[in-house]
Amino acid sequence: MRLPYIAAIAAACLVSPRPADAVDLPVPESIGTTWSGPYIGGHIGGLAARFEGETSFTAETLPTDATPGLVNSASFDGANLRDEGLLAGVQAGYNFQNRRLVFGVEGDFSWTGIRDSTDFSISAAELTATGVGAIVETVDGFVSEQEHEVDWLATFRGRVGLGTERVLVYATGGLAIAETTSETTFFASFDGNVVAISESDSDTRIGWTLGAGVEGAVTRDISARLEYLFADLGTEDHDLGTYIDITDAFHQDAASEDELTLQLLRFGLNYRF
């Protein structure tokens, strides 16, 4: 029988030394990344802010013995302001992973460089056409300078995405909180005397945010990411006070409101425990 002879040759081949010129093919090395667990990190990026404003007036003609009192009001679009700046901050979160599905929570805090001002005016003709009063001497109507500042921004969000060993693509959304400062300087008239008045206030705005990002593993514990967020911080009202006052005859107040939206693009590094 030749079968035992063939088996002997095969066994000899298995135990014989390999040729000296044999070459090992490279094998991709796993970094063993898992996205689950806690992490902390920092980020830098750019921020675009948009303030869309509305200015309103309430005019009251006081009653006399011969005429009744009268109240009129009017609203005008503006002032609007757009500004871009830098931001930097920190973040921390926790991820859970089930096969490729990754979900978790994250909170972050950013200092921003948003601060800008714009001139805004409404002519006397526009004001009187709506039935409210206007300053016609020294200045023409309502003349103002409005300044807005975003001091800081914080978000608290959920995240859900799909992850491989090296890459995580995710969507995110949740709560947004920002501290803003607004100041309006305008001309007001008191019994014919026109003076400049400044009114300022700080507000903590609460709104919502949505976005998406991609994160890549650099090492087993360190990852880098690029993230975009849109945030709507809602509308805030500002009482500007007296615009025109004529003792015992006429009084008119001014007020403004603005809606704030933000767009963020930021790069970050995370360290996973």
Image (cartoon, rainbow, N blue to C red):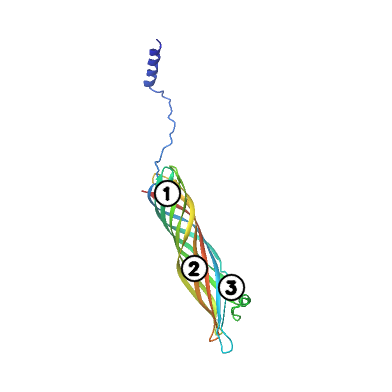
Q: Is the residue 174 above or below the residue 247 in the image?
A: above
Mark 1 is on which residue type?
Phe
Q: Which mark is residue 69?
A: none
Q: CA distance from mark 2 to mark 1?
A: 34 Å
Q: Earlier in the sequence, mark 2 or mark 1?
A: 1
Q: Which residue is mark 3?
A: 121
Q: Does residue 26 appear left or right of residue 259 in this picture?
A: left
Q: Position of residue 186 (x, y in %)?
A: 54, 76
Residue at 43 percent of width and 45 percent of height: 101
Q: How many marks?
A: 3
Q: Are marks 1 and 3 in contact (CB under 8 Å)?
A: no
Residue 174 seen in render: yes
Secondary structure of residue under mark 2: strand
Which badge, 2 or 3, is on the more N-terminal residue? 3
Which residue bears the numbered disc 2?
Answer: 236
Q: Nearer the viewer, residue 149 or 103?
A: 103
